[in-house]
Image (spheres, rainbow, N blue to C red):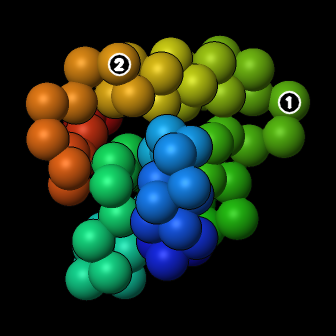
Amino acid sequence: MSLISRGLEEAGIPSVLVSVMKPLSSPSRPPRQLIRKLNIGATVGRPGDTATQLETLRRMVALLSEAEAPGAIDEGP
């Protein structure tokens, strides 16, 4: 997914990669990366967990608008 994110950026489409496994996603240097401490398969939150899903979306938008340089990473809770 990191390579797709980079391709989108090259086409002028801003993107944020959401990952639960930084060691797997970081080596390909995605433009912006949000690391969530969630389960594999529920990267933005479990089904029906609207609060976690909204928090993930808020953090993604914040990273898009606030990142100062390529390679920005949000590893918050």
Q: What residue type is labelled 1?
A: Gly
Residue occupying image coordinates x 32% and y 81%: 28
- Seen at 33% across and 55% down, the residue is 31
Locate residue 25: give its quadrant.
bottom left
Going 33% across and 48% down the picture, which residue do you hit? 32
Are the residues flagged by discs 2 and 1 in contact, CB closer than 8 Å? no
Instruction: Give 71 or 75, whichever is nearer the viewer.
Output: 71
Q: What residue type is labelled 2?
A: Ser
Q: Identify the mark at residue 48; answer none if there is no mark.
A: 1
As drawn, 76 above or below 24: above
In this view, the residue in front, 11 or 68, is: 11
* Left or right, residue 45 beside residue 6: right
The reply to whether residue 18 is in sight is no
Q: Is residue 39 visible?
A: yes
Q: Is residue 68 left or right of residue 5?
A: left
Sequence-first disc among 2 and 1: 1
Name the residue tied to disc 2: 65
